[in-house]
Amino acid sequence: DAKDSGHCQWQSPSNIALVKYWGKKHEQIPCNPSISFTLKNAQTTTSLEWERKDVPSSSDVDFTFYFHGQEKESFRQRIQKYLNRMAEEIPLLLNYRLTISSENTFPHSSGIASSASAMNALAAALIDMERQITISIPSEETKQSKFDQRISRLSRLGSGSACRSNYANAALWGQCSYPGSSDAYAVGLGTILHPVFQQYKDAILLVDQGEKKVSSSAGHQLMVGNPYGDVRYQEARKNTENLLEILKSGDLDAFTTLVEAEAMTLHALMMASSPGYILMHPNTLIIIQAIQGYRKDTGIPVCFTLDAGPNVHLLYPDHHKDPVKKFIQDELISYCVDRQWIDDEMGSGSRKL
Ligand code: PMV
Protein backbone atom coordinates (compact mmCIF):
# COMPACT_ATOMS: atom_id res chain seq x y z
CA ASP A 1 0.00 0.00 0.00
CA ALA A 2 1.48 3.36 -1.09
CA LYS A 3 0.33 4.80 2.25
CA ASP A 4 2.95 2.67 4.05
CA SER A 5 5.78 2.66 1.54
CA GLY A 6 6.44 3.15 -2.13
CA HIS A 7 8.74 4.55 -4.75
CA CYS A 8 8.87 6.40 -8.03
CA GLN A 9 11.52 7.57 -10.45
CA TRP A 10 11.56 10.71 -12.58
CA GLN A 11 13.87 12.09 -15.21
CA SER A 12 14.08 15.81 -16.00
CA PRO A 13 16.28 17.66 -18.45
CA SER A 14 18.24 20.85 -18.13
CA ASN A 15 17.20 23.87 -20.18
CA ILE A 16 19.02 26.76 -21.81
CA ALA A 17 17.57 30.25 -21.48
CA LEU A 18 17.34 32.44 -24.60
CA VAL A 19 15.84 35.42 -22.76
CA LYS A 20 17.53 35.28 -19.37
CA TYR A 21 16.07 35.25 -15.90
CA TRP A 22 18.50 37.39 -13.90
CA GLY A 23 17.12 39.22 -10.89
CA LYS A 24 14.35 38.06 -8.59
CA LYS A 25 11.99 39.01 -5.82
CA HIS A 26 11.21 36.66 -2.93
CA GLU A 27 10.95 32.89 -3.59
CA GLN A 28 12.11 33.04 -7.17
CA ILE A 29 9.50 35.46 -8.45
CA PRO A 30 11.35 36.78 -11.49
CA CYS A 31 11.91 40.47 -12.26
CA ASN A 32 11.28 39.71 -15.94
CA PRO A 33 9.86 36.91 -18.09
CA SER A 34 12.25 34.39 -19.66
CA ILE A 35 12.15 31.84 -22.49
CA SER A 36 14.19 28.64 -22.80
CA PHE A 37 14.76 25.61 -24.99
CA THR A 38 14.39 22.32 -23.18
CA LEU A 39 17.40 20.02 -23.60
CA LYS A 40 17.47 16.28 -24.23
CA ASN A 41 20.76 14.74 -23.15
CA ALA A 42 21.65 16.76 -20.06
CA GLN A 43 19.29 15.07 -17.60
CA THR A 44 18.91 14.26 -13.91
CA THR A 45 17.29 10.99 -12.86
CA THR A 46 15.90 10.98 -9.33
CA SER A 47 14.36 8.07 -7.51
CA LEU A 48 12.33 8.59 -4.38
CA GLU A 49 11.42 5.94 -1.80
CA TRP A 50 9.13 6.60 1.12
CA GLU A 51 8.39 4.72 4.28
CA ARG A 52 5.80 5.71 6.85
CA LYS A 53 7.19 6.78 10.23
CA ASP A 54 5.64 5.72 13.54
CA VAL A 55 5.86 9.27 14.80
CA PRO A 56 5.59 12.15 12.27
CA SER A 57 8.35 14.79 12.24
CA SER A 58 7.35 18.09 13.70
CA SER A 59 9.43 20.39 11.48
CA ASP A 60 12.28 18.86 9.47
CA VAL A 61 11.42 16.38 6.73
CA ASP A 62 13.37 13.16 7.39
CA PHE A 63 15.54 12.13 4.43
CA THR A 64 18.75 10.60 3.14
CA PHE A 65 20.23 11.88 -0.10
CA TYR A 66 22.52 9.96 -2.44
CA PHE A 67 24.25 11.52 -5.42
CA HIS A 68 25.68 8.92 -7.80
CA GLY A 69 25.35 6.37 -5.03
CA GLN A 70 27.11 8.39 -2.32
CA GLU A 71 25.74 10.41 0.54
CA LYS A 72 26.43 14.05 -0.27
CA GLU A 73 26.79 16.29 2.78
CA SER A 74 27.37 19.40 0.68
CA PHE A 75 23.87 19.23 -0.84
CA ARG A 76 22.16 18.34 2.43
CA GLN A 77 21.34 21.80 3.72
CA ARG A 78 19.83 23.01 0.46
CA ILE A 79 17.70 19.88 0.11
CA GLN A 80 16.57 20.03 3.74
CA LYS A 81 15.47 23.62 3.25
CA TYR A 82 13.65 22.71 0.06
CA LEU A 83 11.89 19.67 1.57
CA ASN A 84 10.78 21.69 4.58
CA ARG A 85 9.34 24.27 2.21
CA MET A 86 7.66 21.44 0.26
CA ALA A 87 6.07 20.18 3.48
CA GLU A 88 4.06 23.42 3.55
CA GLU A 89 2.66 22.41 0.14
CA ILE A 90 2.54 18.65 0.77
CA PRO A 91 2.07 18.24 4.56
CA LEU A 92 2.10 14.42 4.42
CA LEU A 93 5.86 14.55 3.71
CA LEU A 94 6.34 14.91 7.48
CA ASN A 95 4.83 11.44 8.01
CA TYR A 96 7.51 9.67 5.96
CA ARG A 97 11.19 8.85 5.80
CA LEU A 98 12.48 9.66 2.33
CA THR A 99 15.38 8.18 0.44
CA ILE A 100 16.34 10.30 -2.55
CA SER A 101 18.90 9.08 -5.10
CA SER A 102 19.98 11.32 -7.94
CA GLU A 103 22.22 10.91 -10.96
CA ASN A 104 23.14 13.22 -13.80
CA THR A 105 23.68 11.94 -17.32
CA PHE A 106 26.29 14.62 -17.91
CA PRO A 107 29.70 14.67 -16.21
CA HIS A 108 28.94 16.03 -12.73
CA SER A 109 31.79 18.44 -12.50
CA SER A 110 31.39 19.64 -16.07
CA GLY A 111 30.29 23.10 -15.03
CA ILE A 112 26.83 22.44 -16.44
CA ALA A 113 24.28 23.86 -14.02
CA SER A 114 22.34 20.88 -12.74
CA SER A 115 19.97 22.67 -10.37
CA ALA A 116 17.30 23.04 -13.09
CA SER A 117 17.14 19.34 -13.97
CA ALA A 118 17.68 18.22 -10.35
CA MET A 119 15.01 20.43 -8.78
CA ASN A 120 12.51 19.62 -11.52
CA ALA A 121 12.98 15.85 -11.12
CA LEU A 122 12.73 16.09 -7.34
CA ALA A 123 9.56 18.21 -7.45
CA ALA A 124 7.99 15.75 -9.91
CA ALA A 125 8.85 12.79 -7.68
CA LEU A 126 7.41 14.47 -4.56
CA ILE A 127 4.17 15.33 -6.35
CA ASP A 128 3.96 11.78 -7.70
CA MET A 129 4.43 10.43 -4.17
CA GLU A 130 1.60 12.61 -2.92
CA ARG A 131 -0.58 11.48 -5.80
CA GLN A 132 0.10 7.79 -5.09
CA ILE A 133 -0.62 8.18 -1.38
CA THR A 134 -3.79 10.20 -1.80
CA ILE A 135 -4.86 8.16 -4.87
CA SER A 136 -6.12 11.09 -6.86
CA ILE A 137 -4.92 10.13 -10.31
CA PRO A 138 -5.84 12.73 -12.91
CA SER A 139 -7.30 11.33 -16.10
CA GLU A 140 -8.21 14.11 -18.49
CA GLU A 141 -5.77 16.23 -20.38
CA THR A 142 -6.78 19.35 -18.46
CA LYS A 143 -5.64 17.63 -15.32
CA GLN A 144 -2.35 16.67 -16.95
CA SER A 145 -1.72 20.34 -17.61
CA LYS A 146 -2.48 21.12 -13.95
CA PHE A 147 0.00 18.39 -12.97
CA ASP A 148 2.68 19.99 -15.19
CA GLN A 149 1.87 23.38 -13.74
CA ARG A 150 2.32 22.04 -10.24
CA ILE A 151 5.67 20.41 -11.06
CA SER A 152 6.74 23.71 -12.56
CA ARG A 153 5.59 25.83 -9.63
CA LEU A 154 7.08 23.58 -6.95
CA SER A 155 10.39 23.20 -8.79
CA ARG A 156 10.54 27.02 -9.08
CA LEU A 157 10.68 27.15 -5.29
CA GLY A 158 13.92 25.11 -5.44
CA SER A 159 15.57 26.91 -8.35
CA GLY A 160 13.92 29.50 -10.58
CA SER A 161 15.13 28.19 -13.92
CA ALA A 162 13.99 24.65 -12.93
CA CYS A 163 10.36 25.61 -13.54
CA ARG A 164 11.02 25.67 -17.30
CA SER A 165 12.44 22.13 -17.48
CA ASN A 166 9.36 19.90 -17.55
CA TYR A 167 7.90 21.15 -20.83
CA ALA A 168 8.73 19.76 -24.26
CA ASN A 169 10.89 21.83 -26.61
CA ALA A 170 10.48 25.34 -25.19
CA ALA A 171 9.00 27.13 -22.21
CA LEU A 172 8.04 30.61 -21.09
CA TRP A 173 8.16 31.71 -17.46
CA GLY A 174 6.89 35.05 -16.25
CA GLN A 175 3.84 37.14 -16.83
CA CYS A 176 3.63 38.80 -20.24
CA SER A 177 1.16 39.06 -23.13
CA TYR A 178 1.21 35.29 -23.77
CA PRO A 179 -2.09 33.70 -22.67
CA GLY A 180 -1.77 31.78 -19.42
CA SER A 181 1.71 33.08 -18.62
CA SER A 182 2.56 33.49 -14.95
CA ASP A 183 5.34 34.48 -12.57
CA ALA A 184 4.49 31.42 -10.45
CA TYR A 185 5.14 28.71 -13.06
CA ALA A 186 6.23 28.21 -16.66
CA VAL A 187 4.07 27.23 -19.60
CA GLY A 188 5.07 25.10 -22.59
CA LEU A 189 5.73 26.77 -25.94
CA GLY A 190 6.20 23.54 -27.90
CA THR A 191 3.12 24.11 -30.03
CA ILE A 192 3.97 27.61 -31.28
CA LEU A 193 7.41 26.79 -32.73
CA HIS A 194 8.09 27.31 -36.42
CA PRO A 195 9.37 24.04 -38.04
CA VAL A 196 12.94 25.45 -38.30
CA PHE A 197 13.13 25.29 -34.49
CA GLN A 198 12.08 21.64 -34.27
CA GLN A 199 14.95 19.53 -32.92
CA TYR A 200 17.11 22.65 -32.65
CA LYS A 201 20.66 21.69 -31.71
CA ASP A 202 22.73 22.89 -28.75
CA ALA A 203 26.42 22.03 -28.66
CA ILE A 204 27.56 22.74 -25.09
CA LEU A 205 31.23 23.68 -25.31
CA LEU A 206 32.87 23.07 -21.94
CA VAL A 207 35.39 25.78 -21.25
CA ASP A 208 35.89 25.25 -17.54
CA GLN A 209 34.71 22.64 -15.06
CA GLY A 210 35.43 24.47 -11.84
CA GLU A 211 33.02 25.78 -9.23
CA LYS A 212 31.71 29.20 -10.17
CA LYS A 213 33.32 32.10 -8.32
CA VAL A 214 29.91 33.71 -7.85
CA SER A 215 26.86 31.44 -7.52
CA SER A 216 23.60 32.16 -9.35
CA SER A 217 21.87 33.05 -6.10
CA ALA A 218 24.60 35.57 -5.23
CA GLY A 219 24.31 36.87 -8.80
CA HIS A 220 20.54 37.39 -8.51
CA GLN A 221 21.16 39.17 -5.22
CA LEU A 222 23.64 41.54 -6.84
CA MET A 223 20.92 42.65 -9.27
CA VAL A 224 19.35 44.44 -6.30
CA GLY A 225 21.01 47.84 -6.54
CA ASN A 226 22.42 47.25 -10.01
CA PRO A 227 22.02 50.69 -11.67
CA TYR A 228 20.98 49.05 -14.96
CA GLY A 229 18.39 46.76 -13.32
CA ASP A 230 15.20 48.57 -14.29
CA VAL A 231 16.36 49.20 -17.86
CA ARG A 232 17.32 45.55 -18.10
CA TYR A 233 13.93 44.26 -16.91
CA GLN A 234 12.20 46.50 -19.45
CA GLU A 235 14.49 45.29 -22.23
CA ALA A 236 13.91 41.65 -21.25
CA ARG A 237 10.13 42.17 -21.39
CA LYS A 238 10.52 43.58 -24.91
CA ASN A 239 12.85 40.73 -25.92
CA THR A 240 10.36 38.18 -24.59
CA GLU A 241 7.56 39.61 -26.73
CA ASN A 242 9.84 39.77 -29.77
CA LEU A 243 11.18 36.25 -29.28
CA LEU A 244 7.65 34.85 -29.07
CA GLU A 245 7.03 36.28 -32.55
CA ILE A 246 10.39 35.02 -33.84
CA LEU A 247 9.70 31.51 -32.56
CA LYS A 248 6.46 31.56 -34.59
CA SER A 249 7.89 33.12 -37.75
CA GLY A 250 11.20 31.23 -37.89
CA ASP A 251 13.23 34.40 -38.58
CA LEU A 252 16.73 33.10 -37.82
CA ASP A 253 18.52 36.41 -38.35
CA ALA A 254 16.32 38.07 -35.76
CA PHE A 255 16.76 35.01 -33.50
CA THR A 256 20.55 35.28 -33.66
CA THR A 257 20.59 39.01 -32.93
CA LEU A 258 18.25 38.69 -29.96
CA VAL A 259 19.78 35.57 -28.41
CA GLU A 260 23.38 36.84 -28.61
CA ALA A 261 22.34 40.23 -27.20
CA GLU A 262 20.68 38.47 -24.25
CA ALA A 263 23.82 36.42 -23.52
CA MET A 264 26.09 39.45 -23.66
CA THR A 265 23.70 41.51 -21.54
CA LEU A 266 23.67 38.81 -18.84
CA HIS A 267 27.44 39.01 -18.54
CA ALA A 268 27.47 42.81 -18.84
CA LEU A 269 25.10 42.92 -15.85
CA MET A 270 27.58 40.83 -13.87
CA MET A 271 30.41 43.18 -14.77
CA ALA A 272 28.25 46.18 -13.83
CA SER A 273 27.31 44.75 -10.41
CA SER A 274 28.92 46.06 -7.25
CA PRO A 275 31.35 44.39 -6.83
CA GLY A 276 31.64 43.52 -10.51
CA TYR A 277 32.75 40.07 -11.57
CA ILE A 278 33.59 38.15 -14.73
CA LEU A 279 32.52 34.54 -15.30
CA MET A 280 33.76 34.30 -18.89
CA HIS A 281 37.21 32.91 -19.55
CA PRO A 282 39.58 33.92 -22.34
CA ASN A 283 38.53 30.80 -24.28
CA THR A 284 34.87 31.84 -23.97
CA LEU A 285 35.68 34.96 -25.98
CA ILE A 286 37.79 33.07 -28.52
CA ILE A 287 34.91 30.63 -29.11
CA ILE A 288 32.34 33.44 -29.42
CA GLN A 289 34.46 35.19 -32.03
CA ALA A 290 35.01 31.94 -33.94
CA ILE A 291 31.24 31.33 -34.00
CA GLN A 292 30.51 34.83 -35.30
CA GLY A 293 33.28 34.50 -37.91
CA TYR A 294 31.96 31.12 -39.07
CA ARG A 295 28.46 32.55 -39.46
CA LYS A 296 29.77 35.44 -41.52
CA ASP A 297 31.93 33.20 -43.74
CA THR A 298 29.44 30.40 -44.38
CA GLY A 299 26.01 31.99 -43.94
CA ILE A 300 25.09 29.06 -41.67
CA PRO A 301 22.86 30.47 -38.90
CA VAL A 302 24.85 29.39 -35.83
CA CYS A 303 24.57 31.56 -32.73
CA PHE A 304 25.83 31.42 -29.18
CA THR A 305 24.37 31.86 -25.76
CA LEU A 306 25.88 31.72 -22.28
CA ASP A 307 24.66 30.63 -18.87
CA ALA A 308 25.98 32.10 -15.66
CA GLY A 309 29.40 30.58 -16.37
CA PRO A 310 32.19 30.29 -18.94
CA ASN A 311 30.72 27.51 -21.11
CA VAL A 312 29.36 28.40 -24.53
CA HIS A 313 26.11 27.01 -25.96
CA LEU A 314 26.25 26.87 -29.75
CA LEU A 315 22.69 26.81 -31.15
CA TYR A 316 21.90 25.80 -34.73
CA PRO A 317 19.19 24.19 -36.87
CA ASP A 318 19.27 20.40 -37.11
CA HIS A 319 19.68 20.32 -40.90
CA HIS A 320 23.06 22.08 -40.64
CA LYS A 321 24.48 19.52 -38.23
CA ASP A 322 27.11 17.96 -40.52
CA PRO A 323 29.12 21.11 -41.36
CA VAL A 324 28.62 22.54 -37.85
CA LYS A 325 29.95 19.38 -36.17
CA LYS A 326 32.98 19.54 -38.46
CA PHE A 327 33.47 23.18 -37.43
CA ILE A 328 33.28 22.16 -33.75
CA GLN A 329 35.81 19.36 -34.24
CA ASP A 330 38.20 21.36 -36.40
CA GLU A 331 38.08 24.76 -34.74
CA LEU A 332 36.33 24.84 -31.39
CA ILE A 333 37.24 21.79 -29.32
CA SER A 334 40.84 22.85 -28.93
CA TYR A 335 39.50 25.68 -26.71
CA CYS A 336 37.38 23.27 -24.61
CA VAL A 337 38.70 21.71 -21.42
CA ASP A 338 39.97 18.22 -22.28
CA ARG A 339 38.38 18.79 -25.73
CA GLN A 340 34.99 18.12 -24.13
CA TRP A 341 31.60 19.16 -25.45
CA ILE A 342 28.06 17.82 -25.10
CA ASP A 343 26.10 17.17 -28.27
CA ASP A 344 22.60 18.16 -27.15
CA GLU A 345 19.33 19.23 -28.73
CA MET A 346 15.73 20.02 -27.94
CA GLY A 347 13.99 17.37 -25.90
CA SER A 348 10.64 16.36 -24.56
CA GLY A 349 10.69 17.51 -20.93
CA SER A 350 10.33 15.49 -17.75
CA ARG A 351 8.98 11.95 -17.63
CA LYS A 352 8.23 9.19 -15.20
CA LEU A 353 10.46 6.13 -15.61
O1 PMV B 1 17.70 29.23 -11.59
P1 PMV B 1 18.91 29.94 -11.11
O2 PMV B 1 18.71 30.66 -9.84
O3 PMV B 1 20.12 29.01 -11.09
O4 PMV B 1 19.25 31.10 -12.16
C1 PMV B 1 19.57 30.79 -13.50
C2 PMV B 1 19.92 31.98 -14.23
C3 PMV B 1 20.44 31.75 -15.65
O5 PMV B 1 20.75 30.41 -15.90
C4 PMV B 1 21.72 32.57 -15.83
C5 PMV B 1 19.43 32.26 -16.67
C6 PMV B 1 18.21 31.43 -16.86
O6 PMV B 1 17.16 32.03 -17.16
O7 PMV B 1 18.28 30.19 -16.77
Image (tube, grey):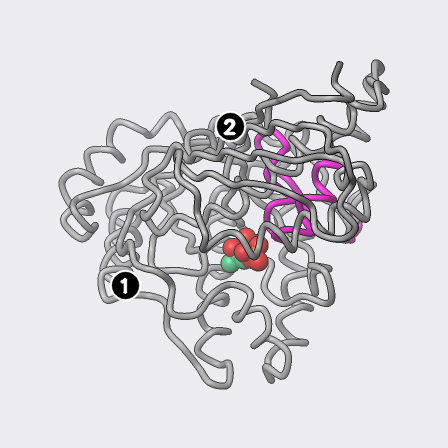
In the rendered image, the quadrant that contains the C terminus is top right
What's the mark number on residue 285?
A: 1
Q: Which residues are magenta?
A: 150-177
Q: Which residue is mark 2?
A: 347
Horizontal side of 124 relative to 338 (left or right) equals right
Seen in the picture, residue 218 relative to 305 is either above or below; the reply is below
Label 2: how many Cα within 10 Å (few below 14, some 14–19, many 20+): many
Confirm whether residue 190 shows in the render.
Answer: yes
Horizontal side of 222 relative to 206 (left or right) equals right
Label 1: how many Cα within 10 Å (few below 14, some 14–19, many 20+): few
Taking depth in this image into account, of 236 and 208 the one nearest to the observer is 208
Where is residue 237 shown, x and y percent of the image? 69, 60
Q: Quadrant of residue 232?
A: bottom right
Horizontal side of 110 relative to 197 (left or right) equals left
Asked if the stretch drawn in magenta spans residue 155, the answer is: yes
Taking depth in this image into account, of 326 and 88 the one nearest to the observer is 88
Where is residue 203 shown, x and y percent of the image? 34, 39
Which residue corresponds to the image point at 18% horizontal and 53% vertical from the top-left?
A: 335
Asked if the stretch drawn in magenta spans residue 127, the answer is: no
- SS category of the residue bearing label 2: loop
Where is residue 13 shown, x and y percent of the image? 51, 34
Taking depth in this image into account, of 203 and 257 the one nearest to the observer is 203
What's the mark number on residue 88?
A: none
- SS category of the residue bearing label 1: helix
Taking depth in this image into account, of 302 and 264 the one nearest to the observer is 264
Report the amino acid beneath label 1. Answer: Leu
Marks 1, 2: nearer the viewer? 2
Seen in the picture, residue 197 relative to 336 is either above or below; the reply is above
Report the amino acid beneath label 2. Answer: Gly
| C-alpha gap between disc 1 and disc 2 | 28 Å
Which residue corresponds to the image point at 68% horizontal and 49% vertical from the top-left?
A: 156
Confirm whether residue 19 shows in the render.
Answer: no
